[in-house]
């Protein structure tokens, strides 16, 4: 039985890392630029910084600032942003030192064995039945990450070989230990094959800028699926295969946005393919449970519709699959909240004390 996680930037933010586009562009616009053209994009961001909080969408719109056939110039801007984004995120992921946080990480990931526990009785029974129908199978947790950082990879390496940590079940005198499977970075990493751009050509304000020599390549690098296909690893195809082979999909730390429209279409098509497939979607912003609970129920319906609005299914099929999208505000990784930020603050405090007292013994007390 495959349970696959789709992990977005909310995972790193939960750790306490400053990895939002808003935080990146605030830093990027003040970096040095080698040419007037690269100074121009920084000025454009400075003048429209609030809009650039959705940086991938704004990059597609930024094509309107170029003349037709100016693909080379736009590609230089695109490359510059990607290179600086990689540098910025490397610095942020460096603040997460998993080896110093082993116990916290193990405790947090041990919660994977209780994915259905936040739900009330009826909804929990529906999800538990998916497990029950596959008692003769191993439970494997796979991960599709949309982050460029390696923070999730670090966590998975620590828990991968911890037998029993992720849960187990017995069937026909056999103990099945739940296990970590594979992880795919569909947008690449800070070290290479970075995919940063739009979902499709409709999100490019001025596609005629690519009417130039090598323009087809520049356009492909801007459109996510085509960029992925251009890389030899083709992580996108592998991740889609992983989704197709899954029974439960858990979406964590992702906003349901247009630049990943392709994936929301895939999720809906996958759901429609079998009545025994379910999505668990973590939403930070649900209203609290009330006496009547109307506000919360309405909010949950809206979150379900956010996912299905990108589907090409007819309205009847959309409504049918919405009942198998289970929305929760219970933070599965609550045990990792601000853990990187706190560790970094402890390290800085220790470093300051070392400078002041001239001793290295303090480091040992922190780590």
Image: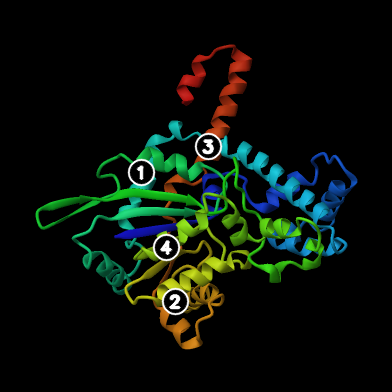
First of labels 3, 1 by sequence position? 3
State the image coordinates of residue 52 (x, y, percent, origin top left).
Answer: 74, 58
| Mark 1 vs 4, N-terminal side | 1
Q: At which x and y percent is residue 229? A: 57, 57
Give the CA distance from mark 1 to mark 2: 32 Å
Name the residue at 59% across, 40% down: 191
Q: Which residue is mark 3?
A: 96
On residue 107, which mark appears?
1
Tell me the distance, in whole angstroms, between the alpha carbons under discs 3 and 1.
17 Å
Residue at coordinates 69% horizontally, 58% vertically from top-left? Answer: 222
Q: Nearer the viewer, residue 242 or 26?
A: 242
> x and y percent of residue 188 in the render?
57, 49
Between residue 157 and residue 207, name the one nearer to us.
207
Disc 2 and disc 4: Cα gap in Å?
A: 33 Å
Residue 250 against residue 333 in the figure, above or below: below
In the image, which disc is placed on residue 243? 4
Identify whether 212 is placed above or below 293. above
Mark 3 residue element? loop
Inter-mark Cα distance, 1 to 4: 26 Å
């Amino acid at each position: 039985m495959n349970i696959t996680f789709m992990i977005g930037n909310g995972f790193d933010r939960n750790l306490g890392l400053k990895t939002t586009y808003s935080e990146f562009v605030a830093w990027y616009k003040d970096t040095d630029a080698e040419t007037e053209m690269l100074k121009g994009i920084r000025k454009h961001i400075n003048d429209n910084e609030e809009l650039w909080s959705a940086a991938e969408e704004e990059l597609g719109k930024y094509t309107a600032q170029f003349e037709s056939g100016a693909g080379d110039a736009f590609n230089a801007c695109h490359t510059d942003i990607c290179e600086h984004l990689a540098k910025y995120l490397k610095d942020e992921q460096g603040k997460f030192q998993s080896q110093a946080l082993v116990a916290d990480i193990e405790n947090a990931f041990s919660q994977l064995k209780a994915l259905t526990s936040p739900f009330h009785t009826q909804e929990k029974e529906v999800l538990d039945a998916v497990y029950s129908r596959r008692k003769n199978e191993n439970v494997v947790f796979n991960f599709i990450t949309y982050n460029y950082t390696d923070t999730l990879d670090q966590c998975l390496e620590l828990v991968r070989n911890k037998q029993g940590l992720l849960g187990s079940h017995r069937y026909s005198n056999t103990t099945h230990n739940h296990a970590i499977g594979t992880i795919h970075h569909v947008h690449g990493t800070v070290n290479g094959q970075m995919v940063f751009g739009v979902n499709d050509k409709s999100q490019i304000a001025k596609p005629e800028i690519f009417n130039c020599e090598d323009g087809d390549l520049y356009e492909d690098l801007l459109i996510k699926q085509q960029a992925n296909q251009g890389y030899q690893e083709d992580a996108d195809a592998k991740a889609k295969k992983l989704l197709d082979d899954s029974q439960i999909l858990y979406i964590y730390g992702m906003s349901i946005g247009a630049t990943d429209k392709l994936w929301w279409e895939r999720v809906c098509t996958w759901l429609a393919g079998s009545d025994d497939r379910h999505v668990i979607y973590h939403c930070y912003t649900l209203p609290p449970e009330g006496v009547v609970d109307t506000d919360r129920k309405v909010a949950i319906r809206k979150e379900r519709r956010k996912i299905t609005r990108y589907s090409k299914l007819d309205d009847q099929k959309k409504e049918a699959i919405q009942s198998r999208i289970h929305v929760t505000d219970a933070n599965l990784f609550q045990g990792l909240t601000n853990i990187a930020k706190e560790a970094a603050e402890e390290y800085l405090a220790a470093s300051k004390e070392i400078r002041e007292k001239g001793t290295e013994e303090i480091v040992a007390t922190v780590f």
